[in-house]
Image (cartoon, rainbow, N blue to C red):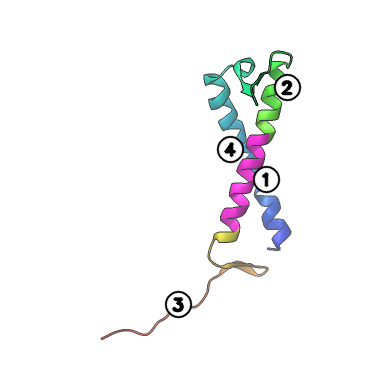
């Protein structure tokens, strides 16, 4: 699996996490009650605030998925499963 394919595969899980996170956040908080940099969002619509919130949550989820991908041990291989670094197999007696 190429690096670009691995990055693209992170998009869908990030989308699902963002959808669930948005439901949880905006069930608890009214979008029009938010204050950003000391300015209330009275002139913005609920749809606009929820849409911007969704995109920000999606970017956060994607960043977390990509970070987990690059911090995971092993390197994706074109031929199949992940190739792991060899372990020390010497037995201590």
Secondary structure found at label 3: loop
Q: Earlier in the sequence, mark 4 or mark 3?
A: 4
Secondary structure found at label 4: helix
Q: Looking at the picture, how far across and down is residue 74, in whole percent?
A: 56, 68
Q: Earlier in the sequence, mark 1 or mark 3?
A: 1
Q: Which mark is residue 17?
A: 4
- Measure the C-alpha gap from mark 4 to mark 3: 34 Å
User: Residue under circle 3?
Assistant: 87
Query: Image quarter for residue 57?
Result: top right
Secondary structure found at label 2: helix
- Measure the C-alpha gap from mark 3 to mark 2: 52 Å
Q: Is residue 65 above or below residue 29?
A: below
Q: Residue at x 70, y 26 (%)?
A: 51
Q: How crowded is mark 4: few (under 14 residues within 10 Å), some or many (20 or more)?
A: some
Q: Which residue is drawn at 66% across and 35% down?
A: 56
- Measure the C-alpha gap from mark 4 to mark 1: 10 Å
Q: Residue lying farthest left?
A: 93
Q: Are the residues flagged by discs 1 and 3 in contact, CB closer than 8 Å?
A: no
Q: Earlier in the sequence, mark 3 or mark 2?
A: 2
Q: Are the residues flagged by discs 4 and 3 in contact, CB closer than 8 Å?
A: no
Q: Which mark is residue 11?
A: 1
Q: Looking at the picture, how far across and down is residue 46, in whole percent?
A: 68, 17
Q: Residues within 10 Å of mark 3 (few under 14, many from 20)?
A: few
The stretch in magenta equals 56-69
Quadrant placement of the C terminus: bottom left
Q: Nearer the viewer, mark 2 or mark 4?
A: 2
Q: Which mark is residue 48?
A: 2
- Measure the C-alpha gap from mark 2 to mark 4: 20 Å
């Amino acid at each position: 699996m190429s690096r670009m394919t691995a990055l693209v595969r992170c998009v869908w899980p990030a989308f699902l996490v963002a959808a669930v996170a948005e439901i949880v956040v905006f069930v608890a908080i009214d979008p029009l009650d938010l204050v950003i940099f000391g300015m209330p969002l009275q002139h913005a619509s609920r749809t606009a605030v929820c849409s911007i919130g969704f995109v920000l949550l999606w970017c956060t989820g994607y960043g977390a998925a990509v970070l987990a991908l690059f911090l995971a041990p092993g390197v994706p291989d074109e031929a199949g499963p992940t190739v792991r670094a060899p372990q020390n197999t010497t037995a201590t007696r």
